[in-house]
């Protein structure tokens, strides 16, 4: 039986629970007795490896020393989490030898939080955004120069106009950045696939230089 409540554990365990399946070298860095003890501990607490269930054959860590791929990162939880339609995404190696692993779960009866707009300071250094803001302020002042509406109302109207422009250009920059990142990640994924098959040092060098664009 699975206990009540939810336990969710994730992280780098620095070992492969199933060396024959989880490492390209098919060997373990710890003894069989230690592996058995850990597996028994997980079984006693009814902890399942969510990532392994959905991606049973994917490796996530590349050891440049041992020239091998292995699975060292785990998301552990109980059976209940599987009812919440979990989805896992495995990213590419960017900042370390480990691929990032992203887990999304959808518990029932969750409530969304209210949204509050805040100015992204990076927009102030974007030339297109700056030009649009300056033009909007100039047009606003010119159009309302002889308008007798109270100043506080004029100010609120101007803020609404500027906020709309900031949101517009923020969305543009986000799309541009996302597209550039996706192109680089796609290239990185292709290189990683080639490297898994060939173990080429030349391809590994390309992987390293490609990662630099994502930092």
Image (cartoon, grey):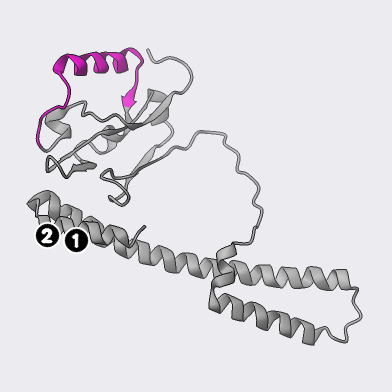
Determine whether the residue tagged by mark 2 lies in a helix, strand or loop.
helix
* Magenta span contains residue 27: yes
Asked whether, in this view, residue 84 is left or right of residue 64, the answer is right
Identify the residue at the far front of this view.
Answer: 65
Residue 162 in percent (x, y) is at 68, 71
Q: Which residue is mark 2?
A: 202
Determine whether the residue tagged by mark 1 lies in a helix, strand or loop.
helix
Q: Residue shown at 29%/46% (left/top)?
A: 96
Determine whether 192 is above or below 157 in the image: above
Determine whether 47 is above or below 171 in the image: above
* Magenta span contains residue 104: no
Q: Report how far apart the C-alphas of labels 2 and 1 lie in the structure.
A: 7 Å
Range of residues picked out in magenta? 25-48
Q: Residue shown at 64%/51% (left/top)?
A: 115
Q: Which residue is mark 1?
A: 206
Q: Is residue 175 visible?
A: yes
Instruction: Please identify the quarter of the rendering in which residue 79 is found.
Output: top left
Determine whether 112 is above or below 143 in the image: above
Q: Residue shown at 11%/59% (left/top)?
A: 202
Residue 140 in percent (x, y) is at 75, 81
Circle 2: is it few (<14), some (14-19), or many (20+) Cα within 10 Å? few
Q: Quadrant of the C terminus?
A: bottom left
Count of labels in the image: 2
Which of 144 and 13 lies nearest the eye of the viewer?
Answer: 13
Residue 88 in percent (x, y) is at 35, 41
Which of 18 and 209 lies nearest the eye of the viewer?
Answer: 209
Circle 1: is it few (<14), some (14-19), or many (20+) Cα within 10 Å? some
Asked whether, in this view, residue 104 is left or right of residue 50, the answer is right
Instruction: Please identify the quarter of the rendering in which residue 180 is found.
Output: bottom left
Q: Residue shown at 24%/42% (left/top)?
A: 60
Residue contact between numbered discs 2 and 1, judged by CB atoms under 8 Å: yes
């Amino acid at each position: 039986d699975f206990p009540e409540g939810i336990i969710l554990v994730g992280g780098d365990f620095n070992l492969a629970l199933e060396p024959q399946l989880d490492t390209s070298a098919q060997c373990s860095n710890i003894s069989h007795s230690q592996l058995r003890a850990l597996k028994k501990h997980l079984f006693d607490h009814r902890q399942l490896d969510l990532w392994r269930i959905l991606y049973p054959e994917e490796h996530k860590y590349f050891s440049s020393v041992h020239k091998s791929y292995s699975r060292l990162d785990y998301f552990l939880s109980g059976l209940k989490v599987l009812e919440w339609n979990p989805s896992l995404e495995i990213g590419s190696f960017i900042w370390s030898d480990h691929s990032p692993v992203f887990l999304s779960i959808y518990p029932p009866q969750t409530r969304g939080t209210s949204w509050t707009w805040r100015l992204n300071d990076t927009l102030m250094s974007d030339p297109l955004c700056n030009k649009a803001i300056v033009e909007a302020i100039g047009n606003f002042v010119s159009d309302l120069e002889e308008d007798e509406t109270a100043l506080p109302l004029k100010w609120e109207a101007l803020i609404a106009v500027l906020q709309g422009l900031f949101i517009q250009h923020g969305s543009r920059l986000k799309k541009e950045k996302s597209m550039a990142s996706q192109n680089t990640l796609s290239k990185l994924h292709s290189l990683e696939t080639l490297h898994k098959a060939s173990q080429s040092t030349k391809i590994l060098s390309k992987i390293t230089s490609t990662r630099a664009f994502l930092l």
